[in-house]
Image (spheres, helix red, strand yellow):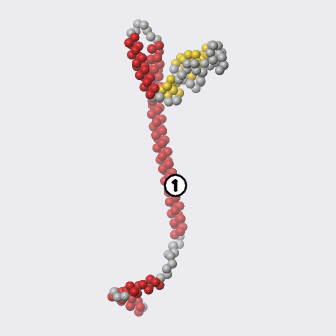
């Protein structure tokens, strides 16, 4: 106690305070601090929680990417479906132009048919830019995926199931069948 008072007195007076503090620090053990009990477990738990949160973050990011892609695909499908329905509703008009141009009347001026041809060509070009393409039938073999047979014709001079005539043109829209071609098919002909 006498030493404590002396230390206090010296420190308070400002003389030799540093010299006295140094031996006290040297007396303390120089070992590394011992972690508190349970600290290692808490650290491992924090690491596990961090890993779990990171995994959840990655999953949420993947879900968001999938959501973005799905909504874009749905928008594209909706746009294509809307265009498909519009084009499908224009096909009878296209058929009407074709019939009008095939059945020319001599009493109607040629300039009228010239105007019809221009309108028909413009309509076909617009629809073609939208992805509409006619299904080829001339000389082709009947394909039930593309053609609809409305009549069969005995013709030994033609190949079996060869398309003889097209009754109504069929169309594809961007490689999807929009309307099958209505055709007459030869039967009783040559094989192959």
* Up/down of 99 relative to 54, above or below: above
Measured as percent of width and height from the top left, residue 152 is found at 61, 16
Question: Is any atom of residue 150 visible in this view?
Answer: no
**Residue where numbered disc 1 is placed:** 55
| Residue at 33 percent of width and 88 percent of height | 13
Q: Nearer the viewer, residue 108 or 125?
A: 125
Question: Is any atom of residue 40 visible in this view?
Answer: yes
- Count residues near mark 1 (Cα–Cα under 10 Å), then give few for <14, some for 14-19, many for 20+: few
Q: Quadrant of residue 94?
A: top left
Quarter of the N terminus within the rendering:
bottom left
| Residue at 41 percent of width and 13 percent of height | 113
Residue at the extreme top: 107
| 185 sits left or right of 3 in the view | right
Q: The residue tagged with tag 1: helix, strand or loop? A: helix
Measured as percent of width and height from the top left, residue 92 is found at 47, 20
Measured as percent of width and height from the top left, residue 63 is found at 49, 47
* Up/down of 4 relative to 65, above or below: below
Quarter of the C terminus within the rendering:
top right
| Residue at 52 percent of width and 57 percent of height | 52
* Up/down of 18 relative to 90, above or below: below
Residue at the extreme left: 13
């Amino acid at each position: 106690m006498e030493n404590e008072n002396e230390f206090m007195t010296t420190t308070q007076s400002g003389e030799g305070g540093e010299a006295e503090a140094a031996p006290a620090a040297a007396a303390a053990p120089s070992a590394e601090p011992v972690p508190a009990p349970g600290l290692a477990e808490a650290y491992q738990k924090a690491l596990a929680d961090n890993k779990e949160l990171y995994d959840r973050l990655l999953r949420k990011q993947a879900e968001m990417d999938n959501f973005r892609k799905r909504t874009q695909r749905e928008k594209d499908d909706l746009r294509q479906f809307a265009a498909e329905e519009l084009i499908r509703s224009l096909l009878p008009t296209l058929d009407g132009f074709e019939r009008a141009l095939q059945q020319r009347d001599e009493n109607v001026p040629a300039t009228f048919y010239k105007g019809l041809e221009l309108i028909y060509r413009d309509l076909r070009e617009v629809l073609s830019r939208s992805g509409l393409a006619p299904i080829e039938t001339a000389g082709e073999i009947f394909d039930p995926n593309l053609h609809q047979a409305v009549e069969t014709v005995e013709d030994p001079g033609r190949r079996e199931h060869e398309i003889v005539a097209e009754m109504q043109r069929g169309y594809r829209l961007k490689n999807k069948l929009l309307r099958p071609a209505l055709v007459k098919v030869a039967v009783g002909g040559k094989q192959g």
